């Protein structure tokens, strides 16, 4: 019987592709539990996603609700730097503090960007660039240790780091690096174990909606079958180590590409559109997008994995319906719902942690014109529209 198997007892030191199959060689180290999914156990997980935890489905849902409904979900902002006109990072720190923003996502471990955050108390999600993954995946754990020490902990305290985001939207969008994602995650996790930080700093990888082959209605949420060989072991790692599934959600893009099916009112949390999905009622596209991932994970047998929206936003210029008024309406609702732990129809009361995109416009970004106009703040620090993070 064929197995999907990740042996986390050993650091990866070699990796190669053979007929599109990930093959790894290992050297022994201290044991960590092994992930091993036979086809039979995979089918059991699919049919009974909560039984392996010894919790009946209803009680499991109640457990999730009680776990997350007692406090507001964190709200952060993405700090993209694909631009040549941005203010100094030291000015950015003051801007964040004056607006009550205490969580930020950095897409790269850039020293000049990281240094000013040291000692500020601002919590960080720090990205590992896609192009770094092969060296982390094919090296020993010492390579990951050196990368963490040299690129992150040399500039900020580990107390300020909440997440390590390994790559960004690799599956399908940057497929060359797909085989290296999970080995890199495991190697970085092992490095954090050695440093005594594995319980505090969570390792995951942000994904775009393109990893789903079906998402509408949300209950049909299904991962692309061509990604199953990498997605299932990845989900197993997240479940085993309490790491969240990171997703990038852009209802704006869904709206402009599917205007014949999606109303602007539905994309902007308006009150005039509802979508019925079985017993669940959806009033906005953000909830539907998040729940499509929740359903997809449950379909694979991982219904208990938490979700963090690592990126979401609405442009204020450069495209159809891209206005400051619409950007304010969208981002305000996203933040308000997180602060109030509204949750989604599939997980009511379970607050969704979000990182709003983007701190500033990024004038060197490629793609459609709207891609360069997500900035919530102007270069002078003034708000582009009156959005509150408190």
Image (tube, rainbow, N blue to C red):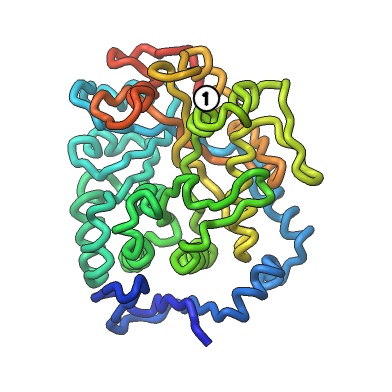
- From the viewer's side, name the closer residue of 188 and 374: 374
Q: Is residue 93 visible?
A: yes
Find residue 166 and report its horizontal and vertical position in percent.
35, 54
In this rendering, position of residue 60 left or right of residue 242 = right
* Residue displayed at 73% across by 67% down: 55
- In the image, residue 147 sits, relative to residue 268, either above or below, namely below
- In the image, residue 245 sits, relative to residue 262, either above or below, namely below
* Residue displayed at 24% across by 70% down: 138
Find residue 264 and report its horizontal and vertical position in percent.
60, 22
- From the viewer's side, name the closer residue of 318 and 345: 318
- In the image, residue 141 sits, relative to residue 7, either above or below, namely above
Name the residue at the bottom extreme.
1
Q: To which quarter of the image does residue 5 belong?
A: bottom left
Tell me how many marks there are. Answer: 1
In this rendering, position of residue 340 left or right of residue 379 = right
In this rendering, position of residue 208 left or right of residue 130 = right
Q: Is residue 241 visible?
A: no
Q: Which residue in the protein does label 1 denote?
A: 331
Q: For mark 1, does the 10 Å Cα neighbourhood hold few (<14), some (14 to 19), or many (20 or more) residues?
A: many
In this rendering, position of residue 1 left or right of residue 11 = right
């Amino acid at each position: 019987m064929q197995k999907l198997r990740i042996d986390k007892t050993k650091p990866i030191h070699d990796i190669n592709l053979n007929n599109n199959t990930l093959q790894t060689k290992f050297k022994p180290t201290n044991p960590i539990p092994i992930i091993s999914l036979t086809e039979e156990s995979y089918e059991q997980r699919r049919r009974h996603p909560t039984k392996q935890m010894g919790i009946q489905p209803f009680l499991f849902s109640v457990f999730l609700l009680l776990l997350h409904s007692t406090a507001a979900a964190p709200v952060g902002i993405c700090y993209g730097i694909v631009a040549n006109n941005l203010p100094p990072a030291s000015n950015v720190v003051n801007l964040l503090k004056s607006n009550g923003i205490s969580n930020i996502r950095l897409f790269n471990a850039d020293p000049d960007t990281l240094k000013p955050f040291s000692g500020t108390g601002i919590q960080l999600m720090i990205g590992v660039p896609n192009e770094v993954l092969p060296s982390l995946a094919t090296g020993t754990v010492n390579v990951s240790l050196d990368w963490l020490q040299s690129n992150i902990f040399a500039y900020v305290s580990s107390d300020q780091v909440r997440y390590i985001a390994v790559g960004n939207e690799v599956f399908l969008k940057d497929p060359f690096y797909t085989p290296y994602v999970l080995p890199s995650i495991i190697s970085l996790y092992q490095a954090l174990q050695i440093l005594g930080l594995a319980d505090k700093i969570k390792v995951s990888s942000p994904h775009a909606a393109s990893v789903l082959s079906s998402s509408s209605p949300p209950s049909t949420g299904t991962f692309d079958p061509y990604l199953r060989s990498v997605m299932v072991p990845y989900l197993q790692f997240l479940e085993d180590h309490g790491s969240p599934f990171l997703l990038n959600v852009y209802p704006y893009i869904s709206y402009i590409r599917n205007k014949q099916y999606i109303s602007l009112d539905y994309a902007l949390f308006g009150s005039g559109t509802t979508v019925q999905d079985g017993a669940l009622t959806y009033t906005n596209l953000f909830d539907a997008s998040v729940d499509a991932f929740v359903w997809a994970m449950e379909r694979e047998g991982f219904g208990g994995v938490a979700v963090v929206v690592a990126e979401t936003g609405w442009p204020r210029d450069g495209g159809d319906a891209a206005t400051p008024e619409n950007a304010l309406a969208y981002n305000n609702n996203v933040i308000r719902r997180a602060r109030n732990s509204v949750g989604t129809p599939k997980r009511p009361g379970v607050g969704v942690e979000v990182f709003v995109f983007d701190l500033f416009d990024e004038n060197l970004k490629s793609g459609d014109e709207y891609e360069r106009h997500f900035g919530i703040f102007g270069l002078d620090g003034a708000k582009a529209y009156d959005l509150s993070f408190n």
